[in-house]
Image (cartoon, rainbow, N blue to C red):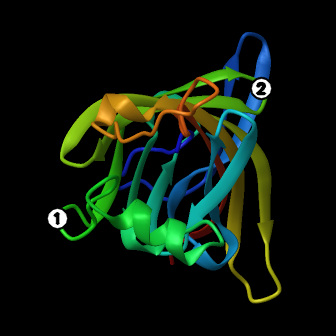
Amino acid sequence: MGIFSRKDKTPATTAASSVSGTTLTAPSGHYTIDPAHTTIGFTARHAMVTNVKGGFGDFTGSLHLAGDPAGSSATLDVRMDSIDTGNADRDNHLKSADFFRTDEFPEMTFRSTKAESLGGDDYRVTGDLSILGVTRQFSIDLEFNGAATDPFGNERVGFEGKAELLRSDWGLTWNAALETGGVLVSDKIKLHFDVSAIKNA
């Protein structure tokens, strides 16, 4: 998710780049997303009047940070049967053939193809998002929250991100009509990310 740098053989350093007169400082290196301190969540409109929120509990990912955001890259693999909306019946429906068909398509994947600075601590990462065997271009806007060394000696970076998608673009079309008009589940889904990643030794 965007800000992620290319893999190279040079030593990891803290590098600076200038974009629109603003100096950006990012800790270069290779990182692994820490699932214990990372949230991948979503929000969908239900019955046209309220929001249902959920997330995924089982995922892996990596970031590669460089001073030049254009050299950045990221990967993310999400186990779809780890979906959790706080309601077992709803979760089972989402795993079923009506939605994610997790028996046939167990993972959702993202592979970045481009990262860019939007100025300040804001970035955009674009890549290939695959769901249900359908791959489409997808962009995520992120804010760099900073870098720190935790009490256990791990060098960490943090990002917050958001994005929107139309689930129908990936073949997720199940719905039910409401008597009052409209549909049960919105096509537009809002995604939110709170990412903590640990620098590889």
Mark 1 Cα within 10 Å, few/some/many (few <14, many 20+)?
few
Query: Could you tell me which residue is drawn at 68 percent across and 79 percent down?
Result: 154
Q: Secondary structure at mark 2?
A: strand
Name the residue type under label 1.
Glu
Residue 77, image x and y in percent?
A: 37, 61
Residue 92, image x and y in percent?
A: 43, 71
Query: Could you tell me which residue is drawn at 79 percent across and 49 percent down?
Result: 145
Query: Could you tell me which residue is drawn at 57 percent across and 51 percent down?
Result: 28
Residue placed most toward the observer, 122 or 52: 52
Q: Earlier in the sequence, mark 1 or mark 2?
A: 2
Which corner quadrant of the image does residue 127 belong to? top left
Q: Which residue position holds label 2?
A: 23
Q: Is residue 160 left or right of residue 176?
A: right
> Residue pushed farthest bottom?
152
Number of the label disc, if any, that sits on residue 67: none
Calculate the distance from the C-alpha at mark 1 to the C-alpha at mark 2.
47 Å
> Residue pushed farthest front?
179
Which corner quadrant of the image does residue 111 belong to? top left
> In the rendered image of this protein, does residue 22 appear above or below residue 66?
above
Camera sees residue 51: yes
Name the residue type under label 2.
Thr
Q: Which residue position holds label 1?
A: 104
> In the rendered image of this protein, does residue 10 appear above or below residue 138?
below
Q: Is residue 74 left or right of residue 16?
A: left
Number of numbered discs overlaid on the protein picture: 2
Q: Secondary structure at mark 1?
A: loop
Residue placed most toward the observer, 175 or 150: 175
Camera sees residue 140: no
Which corner quadrant of the image does residue 134 belong to? top left
Q: Is residue 133 left or right of residue 22?
A: left
> Residue pushed farthest top?
20
> In the rendered image of this protein, does residue 135 appear above or below residue 106?
above
